[in-house]
Amino acid sequence: MNARPTRVIWPFGPYGTSIGLLLALTTPLYFLWTRKDPNHRLSLREIPLEIMNQRYYWHILLYVVMFGFKAFTDHHNEPLKELVGGYTHFIHAIEGNFVHGVQSIIESEIIIQILSLHYLFAYLFIIWYPPVHHILSGDRDLADLSAMNYVFIYLLAVPFYLFFNVEVTSSYVPGVEALMYHDSWNIAFFTNNDPFDNGIPSLHIGLPISLLLIHRAHLKANGIEISTWRHRGLDRFIVANVAIYSFSILYLGIHWVSDIVPGLLLAVICSKTCIHIQPLLREFGIRGAIQTFIDPHHIKAIVFAIIFGMLAISVAINGPGTDSEHPDFRMEGDDVRLDILEIHSLSTPTIVTLTNVGDVPVQILLVDRDFVEPLSDRGFIDFESALPHGLSKTLEGDSEWSFEHLPENLLDVDVILMRSAQGSNEIAEVAVLADYPDSDTLLVSGILLCLPSFGLMGLFVGHVLSERRPDRSG
């Protein structure tokens, strides 16, 4: 067994750097965006009292709960993939290699670095900063709506993430490089936190768009012109980030164009349900929110949404996405693809099967991530240098390799590297199936995790329909 390489522990990885920037910029940006209306700023002495009086401690608790909820949801992703497969081939059939053209527009190390840092930082900023901004500005309703926006849009996305897997473009489109993921600074963080197959929907578009829709509804309801609005600086910042994301998520080899459309749809649903529920929560508390879900005007749509959602899940399980002829990874030339082996048990092994579903021979390497990390640089992984440190096998067309994977400890992270043998310019295709020991148990909890999404979708439909019904009173 090879000794692990010596690593220099750098305390500021992508997440730490983003959080550091976020904390450093919160105060100066707040003062910048409120400079023309300082009378609405809370003093330091007023903040604790404001948090208690307006019950903002619920916002803090909500974010803590969501941190755990997201981690628990992510724990389901890879085990459920064995049961539901993926639909990347369907998305590729719609838009082809368009993303490759986007990535070919410009090659710049500086742009790659800026967009990579922006990808994580701006997303965390849009989650964290708006509620803080509105709390410190004494704007209770927008503080509520900003916090609810993050929670609701993630809840809405859960069924897609668990039962409609779509690989990132840099795993599937030949020639597209994982400019952000395959980098020594980023690879550990993203392999720990990103399954690389949550393409649909794009919340990097959906989250800020939903917040912008909430802003527009707030302006309309209060008869405020955006040119005179005291929060227009924040609003413009969010608009600018949507514009950047519209390019960067394609350029960095992450999303498909098709991922944006469901993100926009969820933004509409999220903003509408937030605006409907927020005043009920403020006036009546949790009981008010529950009442709107069982309201006769809404309950039929909610029940229908839950039934329809459950039927969709039943179709997805062992459904069209599990067709063994469809690859999960496609590559040509010097492309190197990476897949993650998650840790779910230290006693029962995961059964991993890799199948060459094409005609071009493929070289597979099972290797500790610690060896891959220093060999990754802006989309390029030095496969040759990693070879001596892992277990490799060449798969001819229509052949497979099965092995048992049992990590030694919770920090023993292994990855699978794939490339076309001898750098063939023909497209090589590989399907990966990992049978995790807890997949059956996680299927049940995964379905339960989807129920809030179905409930919110049903509430949206029921509320929209009730608004369109003629008022028969009087």
Image (tube, rainbow, N blue to C red):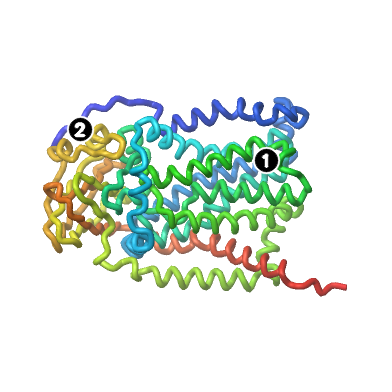
Q: Is residue 218 left or right of residue 75?
A: right
Q: Residue furthest right?
A: 474
Residue 351: quadrant of the picture? bottom left
Q: Is residue 75 above or below residue 129?
A: below
Residue 185: quadrant of the picture? top left
Real-space CA distance between mark 2 and mark 1, rounded to the nearest whole angstrom = 47 Å
Residue corresponding to mark 1: 56
Q: Residue furthest front?
A: 105
Q: Residue at x 62, y 67 (%)?
A: 461
Q: Residues within 10 Å of mark 1 (few under 14, many from 20)?
A: some
Disc with the residue nearer the chain's start (2 vs 1):
2
Q: Position of residue 450 (x, y in %)?
A: 49, 61
Q: Is residue 326 above or below residue 215?
A: below
- Image quadrant where one finds the C terminus: bottom right
Identify the amino acid type marked 1: Tyr
Label number found at residue 4: 2
